[in-house]
Image: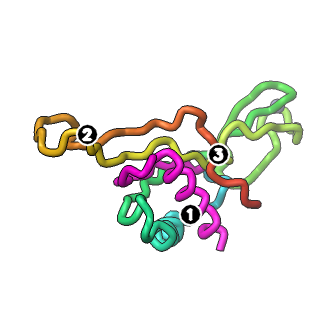
Amino acid sequence: MHELSIATAVLNTALKHADDRRVRTVHLRVGAMRQVVPDSLVFYFEIVARDTACEGAALELIELDTQLSCRRCGRGWSPEIPAFRCPDCGSADVEVQAGEELEVEYIEVEDDDGDDNGQDEADGRTEHHIEEKETACTAPR
Ligand SMILES: [Zn+2]
């Protein structure tokens, strides 16, 4: 049910920024350490989005590799498997640089300003970039 709580958090973030405009796509960055199952997240998102401005919206997941860095020698690396020891100096005093992201990067909404201007203005779509890069989920991993 991990994905259900994430789907709910993502939905709330998207709705907050959508301002009652219909959302077409939600772009989400997810770090590998979140251990999100993409299909499962998409499935739950469709359910929680029903009867909201996000109904029928696509969820685009960008999965990010885990990045670690050694606090002792500064070496940075991306572990194949969870291994939290620095490959250079063997220190276990390491810091997660990337891999814990769970951010709604931006949403695409219907532009209801001009109805049928039909020009090539990204066919009525607006990208709403989310400035503060808020983490969409505080649920325990
Ligand atoms: Zn090191």
Q: Nearer the viewer, residue 89 or 105?
A: 105
Q: Are marks 2 and 3 in contact (CB under 8 Å)?
A: no
- Label 2 or label 3, whichever lies nearer to me, is 2
As drawn, the label of residue 135 is: 3
The answer to whether one can see residue 110 in this image is: yes
Q: Could you tell me which residue is drawn at 70 percent across and 32 percent down?
A: 76
Residue labelled with disc 2: 113
Q: Is residue 63 visible?
A: no
Give the residue displayed 43% in from the left and 69% down from the top: 51
Which x, y percent locates residue 110? 30, 48
Q: Which residue appears at 60% of the width and 70% of the height?
A: 4
Q: Are marks 3 and 1 in contact (CB under 8 Å)?
A: no
- Left or right: residue 8 versus residue 109 is right
Residue at numbered disc 1: 7
Q: Which residues are magenta?
A: 1-30
Q: Is residue 15 magenta?
A: yes
Q: Is residue 136 above or below residue 95?
A: below
